[in-house]
Amino acid sequence: MVLNTQRDLETDVSIREIQNEMTVKEAMTKEIFVMNADASVLEVAREMADHNANNIIVLEDGDSVGIITENDIVSKTVVRNILPAEMLARDIMSSPIISIKPSTGIIEAAELMIKSDIRRLAVMEGNVILGMITDRDILSISPGLNTILVNLIEMNRERDFLQETDVERGICQRCGALTDNLTEVDGVPMCEDCREEEGYYD
């Protein structure tokens, strides 16, 4: 009885090689961005926009106490009709930070993401954050990983859909709200409510 096709064998070899040789330290992104826990969510959103970052590490008394992602900002302020300027970073951060050691293999990192239902891990040595590793960092390493990381691919589908649409996310320059429906009016980015108040209708 044939247990594996040639393609399966090649995939198995590829995965084993990666598991044995590639560590989180080699695949992680070293650039990280931080904000204090008492910063407003609006300040956090602007910092993320300025650096084209999709997450921010939250510090309190110099210690890393949480993480904020784009989804945290949208789900905990925008959809609740709360202005980002009226909430603090500590109010919406996810805590504690789920972390992994830099010497850990990337397969183990992927398994931890799936188990924790998250897309990124802080890479830490003791109490020091060295970088971040994301699902896409892992998926970009080898096509063979897709066969065992299908859950990570599924988690990416919703994000990919949003990126392919014409909807633009950003901060309304009139009211300061973070919105998924930002459009420029006379050169000023505005949310849908402000556009209507100004007499502009889509």
Image (cartoon, grey):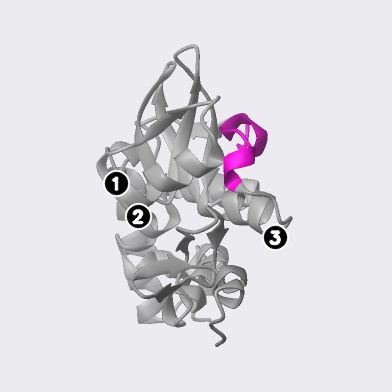
Q: Earlier in the sequence, mark 1 or mark 2?
A: 1
Q: Name the quadrant of the C terminus.
A: bottom right
Mark 1 and mark 2: Cα distance apart in space: 6 Å
Residue 79 tag number: 3
* Dot 1 alpha-carbon crowd within 10 angstroms: few under 14, some 14 to 19, many 20 or more: some
Q: Residue 4 at what x, y percent from top left?
A: 46, 76
Q: Is residue 57 above or below residue 28?
A: above
* Dot 3 alpha-carbon crowd within 10 angstroms: few under 14, some 14 to 19, many 20 or more: few
Q: Residue at the location (30% across, 48% down)?
A: 51
Q: Earlier in the sequence, mark 1 or mark 3?
A: 1
CB atoms of marks 1 and 2 within 8 Å: yes
User: Circle 1 sits on which residue?
Assistant: 27
Q: Nearer the viewer, mark 1 or mark 3?
A: 3
Mark 3 and mark 2: Cα distance apart in space: 29 Å
Residue 11 sits inside the magenta stretch: no
Question: The residue under label 1 is which amino acid type?
Answer: Ala
Closer to the camera in the image, 70 or 86: 86
Question: The residue under label 3 is which amino acid type?
Answer: Val
Q: In what element is the residue under mark 1?
A: helix
Q: Residue at the location (70% across, 60% down)?
A: 79
* Dot 2 alpha-carbon crowd within 10 angstroms: few under 14, some 14 to 19, many 20 or more: some
Q: In what element is the residue under mark 3?
A: loop
Question: The residue under label 2 is which amino acid type?
Answer: Asp
The mark tally for this picture is: 3
Closer to the camera in the image, 39 or 22: 39
Q: Residue at the location (52% across, 62% down)?
A: 152
User: Circle 2 sits on which residue?
Assistant: 137
In this picture, which residue range is highlighted in magenta?
A: 84-95
Residue farthest along the bottom direction in this orientation: 202
Residue 192 lies in quadrant: bottom right
Mark 1 and mark 3: Cα distance apart in space: 34 Å
